[in-house]
Each structure stands twice: as structure tokens, then as C-alpha cells.
Amino acid sequence: MSLSALNYPPLIATAGLSLSAAMPLIRDITLQSPWSVVRAANLLAYGINIISVSRPGRMDGEAATDDGQLSPLNSKTLVAPSGWAFAIWAPIFLGEAIGVASQFLIPEKAKIVPLLKQTSGPFITAQLLQSLWCAAFRPKYKGSKMYISAALLSATAYALSKAHSVFTSSYSSSNVNTYTNLQYGVFFLPMALHFGWVTAASLVNLNGALALQENSKQKVIATVGHASVIGATILGMTVAFRRLAPVYSGVIAWALSAITDTMKKRLEASKLDTDLKKKKDKEDKKKNRELQGLDGASTQYILSKSGAILNAVTTAVLSGFILLAKDSKSIPTP
């Protein structure tokens, strides 16, 4: 039996629900297991995700084409980042590869091991949930089944949030020197990037699923798109300030900047069609705007640009605060 035959929507959805529910159990198992077992489990989960990501046929391939249903310029969704934004996957995957490999250089009695074991449970869960997302984000998941991938990616973000909260809270306790700046860069920075980007990607996935529904109305698509950008803006700033995590707000700023870029290009393209639109009647104009995803694009441009600026300022302020702190040399930048 092939892997594609096992890719049955109810099965993938059930696996995602079960895995999400089992996250506390997975966390407890990693805390109680020997370090040698935990680091092997981290490597295995990461490997499964890499294999899943490398399999062709996912719908995000359409985002790279000009005529695809998920094309940034021609799709109906207003939450469509420009292609350059996805380059962030390179440091995420490379960084996590270095992180899971470097764990085999850390002895059981190392001071950082208890913290790594605390992040391992949610990290493993997130890797496996993203593997399931790779199975669900495919053309066979049509109609309402498309929301399965959005749910799986949101669950991935939630799991990474749990890992993120562990290492960001460790330096706010009395034991500030739990990990060094180098250890942060190797083990935790990739997770911080991953958490921020998957947060944004889950909103992209949700809006894409809504836009591809057969009877979806452009007003609803625009409203959900605006709400998603506003929510991402608030979430980025809130999480960053509460956890003293400028990297998270920085990634949200990156994602919102990519959406701003797409909206700008759509609006510029619409201006080039001015002569053509003058020859059309009012009804045809309205239809043309809907087909190109222009309805609400101007508002989305303002919202996403404002959100990007606010999160970029948040990142700068928090980074400055950390650098100016008395013990800044011992506080990494989560």
C-alpha cells in the first residue's frame, strides 16, 4: 500500500486531533526519559517532518505560479505573502537540523539538558503535526476538507508556542544563566523563528481555504482577511512584550511586510487596467475586481503595513531594552 493511499482526510484529521490531545503525555514522557532517548526522539521527529516536506504535490506549489488558485497576485485571498517571504524556511530547517544534531554533543549532566527536555515534548509534537499538514495541504482535500490543513498548522503553532514559553520564561526566573547566547542561537532561535512563521502561515492557510470555497463571497473573504492581519499584529506585539521575545514580533513583521508587498503589487496592477475598465460597465468592473482579489486590497495594504511597522518597532524597543539591561550579556534574545 502506497503512502498516498493512506492519505485519507478523516484519518489525517483524527491523527491530528489525537496528537494534539497527547501533547501533555508526550511532554511528560520526554521529561521522564533518559536524555539519550529524548534527543533521538527529537531527531526522529525532525526527520519525519523533513521527509514529509520534501514530498511533491502540495498546494503551496501553486503560490509560486502566476495563474494558480493560491497565487499571491491573482488569488481571492487577501492574506497572501509575496514569494520572498518563504525564504525564512531555510534558516528554520537548517537551524533546527543543527539544533537536533548538536544535542548529541551535550552530555546528560549538562546544565541545559533539563530545559532541552522541557522543550522536546512540544517540539516533537509540532514536527509531527507539521508532517500531517504536509499530507493535508494537497488538492485532494477539496471543499470544507481544506480546513483540516489550517487546523493542523494552527495546532503546530500552538505546540511551538509551548516550547517557546519554556525557554523565554527560563531567564525571567532566578536562574538567569540557564543557557548562553551561543546555546540560544543553536537550540532555541530556530524554534522562535518557526513559531513566529507558523503563526502567520496558519492565518495564510485559513484565508486560502476560505477563498477556495466554491460559494465564498468576496466581502466575507475581505473581512476575514482584515481580521487576520489585525489579529496577527496584536498577537505579535502581545507575545513579544509578555515573553520579552523580539524575534517573534520580528517574524510577524516579516510576514506582514510580505502581505503588504502583495497588496501593493495588486493595486499597481489594477491601475494598469484603467483604460480597459473604462470600456466595461459597472457590473463588469465589480466582477473584475473580485476575480483579481482587489476588493478590500486597499484596506488590507494599510492594515498590513501598519501591523508590520508596529511589530518592527516592538522588536526594536525590546531588543534595545535587552541590550541596555544590566545583565544583558547573560540574557539571550528569544
Image (cartoon, helix red, strand yellow):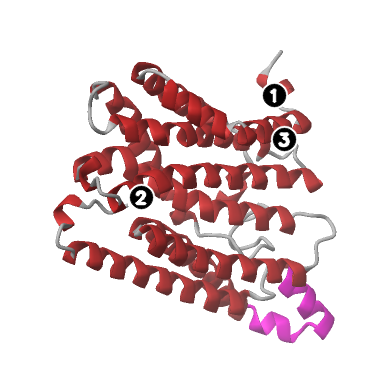
User: Does 275 appear in magenta?
Assistant: yes
The quadrant where residue 244 appears: bottom left
Residue type pointed to by label 1: Ser
For disc 1, the neighbor class at 10 Å (few under 14, some 14 to 19, many from 20) is few
In the rendered view, tell whether residue 32 sits above or below residue 155.
Answer: above
As drawn, the residue found furthest toward the front would be: 174
Residue at figure coordinates x 53%, y 28% from the top left: 26
Q: Which residues are magenta?
A: 273-290
| Residue on which disc 2 sits | 169
Q: Is residue 119 above or below residue 35?
A: below
Mark 2 packing: few (<14 Cα in 10 Å), some, or many (20+)? some
Q: Earlier in the sequence, mark 2 or mark 1?
A: 1
Check residue 164 for magenta coloring. no
Which mark sits nearer the N-terminus, 3 or 1? 1
**What percent of the width, then of the height, locates residue 21?**
64, 35
**What distance separates the C-alpha of mark 2 from that of mark 1?**
41 Å
At a point 60% along the width and 79% down the height, the residue shown is 299
